[in-house]
Amino acid sequence: MMQHADLREHFHRLADSVHAALHAGEGFTLWLAAETSDFVRFNHGKVRQAGQVRQCYITLRLLRGQRHLSETVSLGCGADDAATVLRTLAQLRTLLDDVAEDPHLLLADAVHTTLHAAPSKLPDAGQMTADIVDAAAGCDLVGILASGPVCHGFANHHGQRNWHDTSSWNFDWSVYSHGDKAVKRGGAGFEWQPASLATAIAEARSQLALLGRPARSLAPGGYRAYFTPAALGEIVGMLNWGGFSEKQLRTKRSALLRLAEGEASLDARIALHEDTLHGLAPGFQPEGFIKPERVDLITDGRLSGSLISPRTAKEYGLKANSGSEAPESLVMAGGELPMAEALSALGTGLYVSNLWYLNYSDRAAARMTGMTRFACFWVENGEIVAPLNVMRFDDSLYRMLGSELEALTRETEFLADAGSYGARSSSSQRLPGALLRDFRLVL
């Protein structure tokens, strides 16, 4: 595939070709998603598999009034792409008359052209791989490294052109101990930091010895608990299931409905916002609207905003600020507890490094259930005593981030979604750790 700077010009030429081929009364939008990603899989601290994915997909939407149809095709980024796109246009045209008008279709008609093409700050994948192998020498590290540029583009018949091109890395890994015991970590960013990676792997090694101690099972009940940012990310990530969606709030299906209606509140220190400016996701969406750089969602523990897609905006007479109505660059403000003092502040209780298998046990009450996972420990007097066997929790967001929240860590961590189904994910979170007075285990 061509260099991404050349791809941008190629995309613009394709948009010009489509525009020139329109019939009277027609319009179009083009959405491009492309990446050049190096993937390296590790096992036993060594490279098991390495490869590169180069792909480019374009979605063409043909418009006539409130009728519209779209199709996504793969591009080879060569001279024959124009013929592919124009052939797709002709196919959509033959079907458009059979499509009903869409009363909730809303597309940008004011032209806002943008360009974000940040130069890569990453070394080549070979250097990153060598750094990982050196840091993991002698331990059973497993994981997958994904790195390289991802770009998105938008164009329409009004002449709007948008481009977002950024390079990042994501290393999702764990160090295996025995049985079901492992230390799970991850890292991501726009700049490669081998020293920080080496420190994280060294810390994981130190926890391996603790995992070798006899595991402890706890009786159901309430316990003091410290959540790492990764564990808190699983809790906050549940709000991606329509929690901040304006449509879900309007139809009374959001897990934050009680918060929206003033029937409940979170701790006043809880502040969440969508931070498009500093995230991985592009600052525009497939309908052509420009996303605000920041959308406040929870302020002082109370709902202060929502995410509004163009369809919802059309239906309820609002202004769109999102594409999918799910956070893509979610940030929670930190608190005052130094992360290095988390164990001493916990005293006696649970150190929760990871959670998984989360679901709502009562969506209307924002009550969640799930399992502890990987290196979770029982702590006494600020010292780790034993690893925990897998436990199930069932607790409400209004308790965990409300009445039972004791402190948030001063430091926050950048957590990027490691998903790569179909394409590398552009979703991310930046979160602190959280100290809870009481966390409910049920099994």
Image (spheres, helix red, strand yellow):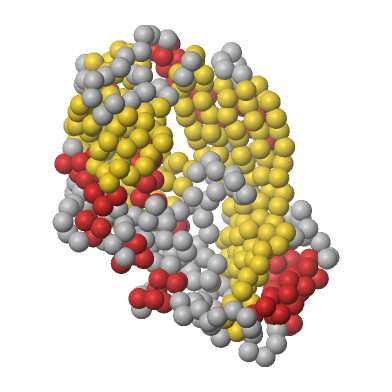
Give the x, y percent position of residue 135. 57, 21
Q: Quadrant of residue 97?
A: bottom right
Could you tell me which residue is drawn at 61 percent across and 74 percent down? Answer: 69
Image quarter hosting the C terminus = top left
Give the x, y percent position of residue 134. 61, 21
Residue found at the very far bottom of the displayed protein: 24
Could you tell me which residue is drawn at 36 percent across and 31 percent down? Answer: 371
The answer to whether any part of residue 120 appears in the image is no
Q: Quadrant of residue 317?
A: bottom left
Give the x, y percent position of residue 31. 62, 66
Instruction: Give the left or right position of residue 250, taking residue 77 as reference.
Output: left
Q: How many marks?
A: 0
Q: Is residue 74 above or below residue 159?
A: above
Give the x, y percent position of residue 273. 34, 55
* 114 and 241: which is toward the camera: 241
* 19 and 241: which is toward the camera: 241
Residue found at the very far right of the displayed protein: 79
Instruction: Give the left or right position of residue 212, taking residue 47 as reference.
Output: left
Instruction: Give the left or right position of residue 419, taking residue 341 as reference.
Output: right
Could you tell me which residue is drawn at 73 percent across and 55 percent down? Answer: 3
Could you tell me which residue is drawn at 56 percent across and 86 percent down? Answer: 65
Q: Quadrant of residue 76?
A: bottom right
The answer to whether any part of residue 358 appears in the image is yes
Q: Is residue 184 above or below residue 240?
A: above
